[in-house]
């Protein structure tokens, strides 16, 4: 991966931080759920931006392997945001069931966690994808492929959580899912893992490692 920002480390750090600050300001002002949460809790917004600043300073200070580390982070936050969206979009009763049967937790605890975590993960996805889409000067097809892989990963994560819910409901009702549904879920798992590894630049056993 050829990184397009300024080549000197001190300037590179400033570009990263200025870009993130501008992006974050746009999110805070946006007519979105995340923007509303951030405007409603300035101390949380300040803490979230401070965490982002710390991460970007570390990246700027350690350029070796940075592209692959950032791809891995993009894949990681995509998975986190998928679960946050899935959970948050459930009804009260469904959240209680999912928390208890699939997360071994309670709705109160999970609701409290996701009150801010959903916004955090939304911001992280925006940040890491935007860094690539605005800073990439490599092959355009490669960038488009990474964006598509992030979309596939999000979709397959959601499919996995849906299956977890479906399986838990079947188990609690004493019902066996048919083999075709189980096979479909296995396919979703394979697609999810493949998208995650390819987005993160992790080679399969018969492949050579990805380069920056």
Image: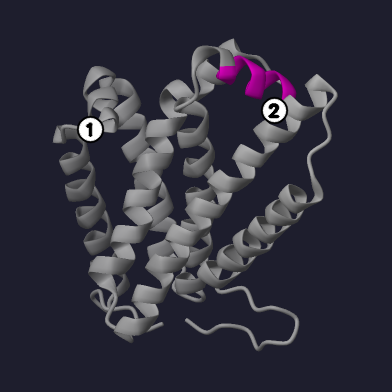
Please tell me whether residue 123 is drawn above or below residue 148 in the rendered image: above
Residue 104 visible (yes or no): no
Q: Nearer the viewer, residue 41 or 206?
A: 206
Q: Nearer the viewer, residue 54 or 73?
A: 73
- The circle drawn on residue 78 is none
Find residue 3 and report its horizontal and vertical position in percent.
Answer: 33, 78
Residue shown at the point (73%, 87%) measured from the top left: 206
Find residue 179 and report its horizontal and vertical position in percent.
Answer: 81, 50
Residue shown at the point (81%, 27%) measured from the top left: 171
Q: Magenta region's main secondary structure?
A: helix
Reading the image, the residue beneath label 2 is 103
**SS under mark 1:** loop
Residue shown at the point (27%, 82%) measured from the top left: 137
Please tell me whether residue 184 is drawn above or below residue 92 in the rendered image: below
C-alpha gap between disc 2 and disc 1 = 28 Å
Q: Badge 2: how crowded within 10 Å, few (<14), some, or many (20+)?
A: few
Residue 145 visible (yes or no): yes
User: Position of 154 compared to 172: left or right?
Assistant: left
Whether 141 is among the magenta residues is no
User: Position of 101 compared to 193: left or right?
Assistant: right
Q: Badge 1: how crowded within 10 Å, few (<14), some, or many (20+)?
A: few
Reading the image, the residue beneath label 1 is 32
Say which quadrant the N terminus sits in: bottom left
Q: Which residues are magenta?
A: 94-101
User: Position of 120 compared to 40: left or right?
Assistant: right
Image-quadrant location for residue 166: top right
């Amino acid at each position: 991966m050829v990184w397009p920002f300024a080549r000197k480390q001190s300037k590179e750090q400033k570009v990263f931080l200025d870009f993130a600050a501008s992006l974050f300001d746009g999110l805070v002002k946006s007519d979105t759920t995340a923007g509303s949460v951030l405007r409603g809790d300035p101390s949380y917004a300040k803490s979230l931006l401070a965490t982002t600043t710390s991460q970007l300073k570390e990246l700027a200070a350690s350029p070796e392997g940075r592209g692959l580390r950032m791809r891995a982070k993009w894949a990681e936050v995509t998975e986190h945001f998928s679960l946050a969206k899935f959970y948050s979009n459930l009804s009260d009763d469904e959240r209680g069931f999912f928390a208890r049967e699939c997360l071994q937790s309670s709705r109160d605890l999970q609701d409290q966690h996701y009150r801010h975590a959903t916004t955090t993960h939304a911001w992280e996805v925006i940040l890491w994808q935007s860094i690539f889409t605005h800073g990439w000067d490599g092959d355009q097809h490669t960038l488009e492929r990474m964006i598509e892989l992030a979309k596939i990963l999000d979709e397959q994560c959601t499919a996995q959580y849906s299956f977890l819910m479906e399986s838990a409901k079947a188990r609690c009702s004493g019902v066996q899912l048919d083999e075709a549904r189980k096979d479909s879920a296995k396919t979703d798992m394979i697609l999810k893992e493949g998208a995650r590894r390819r987005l993160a630049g992790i080679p399969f056993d018969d492949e050579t490692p990805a380069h920056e």
